[in-house]
Image (spheres, helix red, strand yellow):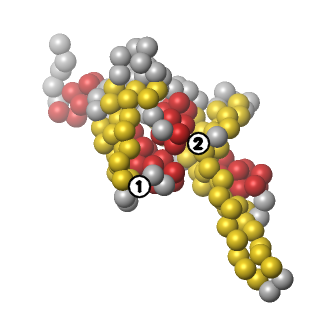
């Protein structure tokens, strides 16, 4: 996993690079796939998956897709507003808010997503498949379910004290 800072204060993290071999008449032809997370460490995060014949091209494609797919995550200080579970296929990710000073307790894939989003105190647990792409998608599903107290009050049509 590598982190690269870009011009617009956005961090890019390469989570995984896969090599695929296609057997042809003259031998093997290799292609590469890259999974990249981008975020501004301030509530915006996205992921991309790019495939190409060479690693730098795959990373570049994935980064472009990650920048296009960025979404906003509601934060409450340095953590998330409430407990949430995300699912994607056989992967499940549980995200729990934590007190300040706890840090990020997470595996490599989930850690890359929450760090890019700017979350610094969180507890996580993954269940089921540990496929990196499925874990990232499950984490994004969990982050999409987050709501702030103000947002819930507005949706219910009540006022908070």
Residue 60 rendering spot, x and y as whole percentages: 72, 50
Q: Residue furthest right?
A: 26
SS class of the residue under badge 1? loop
Hey, which quadrant is residue 10 in on the image?
top right
Residue 125 rendering spot, x and y as whole percentages: 37, 39
Q: Cα distance, mark 2 to mark 1? A: 19 Å
Q: Quadrant of the C terminus?
A: top left
Position of 82 with respect to 76 (left or right) is left
Circle on res. 129: 1
Q: Residue at x 77, y 73 (%)?
A: 29
* Residue designated by label 2: 37
Q: Residue at x 71, y 56 (%)?
A: 58
Q: Residues within 10 Å of mark 1 (few under 14, many from 20)?
A: few
Residue 67: tell me if it is visible: no
* Front residue (pair 131, 39): 131
Residue 134 rendering spot, x and y as whole percentages: 46, 54
Q: Residue at x 55, y 46 (%)?
A: 47
Q: Residue at x 45, y 52 (%)?
A: 130
Residue 91: tell me if it is visible: yes
Residue 13 rendering spot, x and y as whole percentages: 63, 39
SS class of the residue under badge 2? strand
């Amino acid at each position: 996993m590598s982190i690269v800072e870009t011009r617009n204060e956005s961090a890019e993290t390469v989570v995984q690079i896969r090599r695929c071999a296609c057997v042809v008449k003259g031998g093997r032809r290799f292609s590469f796939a890259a999974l990249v997370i981008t975020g501004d460490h301030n509530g915006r995060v996205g992921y991309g998956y790019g495939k190409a014949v060479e690693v730098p091209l795959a990373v570049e494609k994935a980064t472009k897709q990650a920048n296009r797919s960025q979404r906003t995550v509601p934060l409450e200080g340095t953590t998330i507003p409430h407990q949430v579970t995300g699912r994607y296929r056989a992967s499940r990710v549980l995200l729990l808010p934590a007190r300040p000073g706890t840090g990020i307790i997470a595996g490599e894939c989930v850690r890359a997503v929450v760090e890019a989003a700017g979350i610094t105190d969180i507890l996580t647990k993954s269940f089921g498949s540990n496929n990196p792409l499925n874990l990232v998608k499950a984490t994004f599903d969990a982050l999409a379910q987050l709501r702030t107290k103000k947002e819930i009050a507005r949706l219910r049509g009540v006022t908070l004290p």
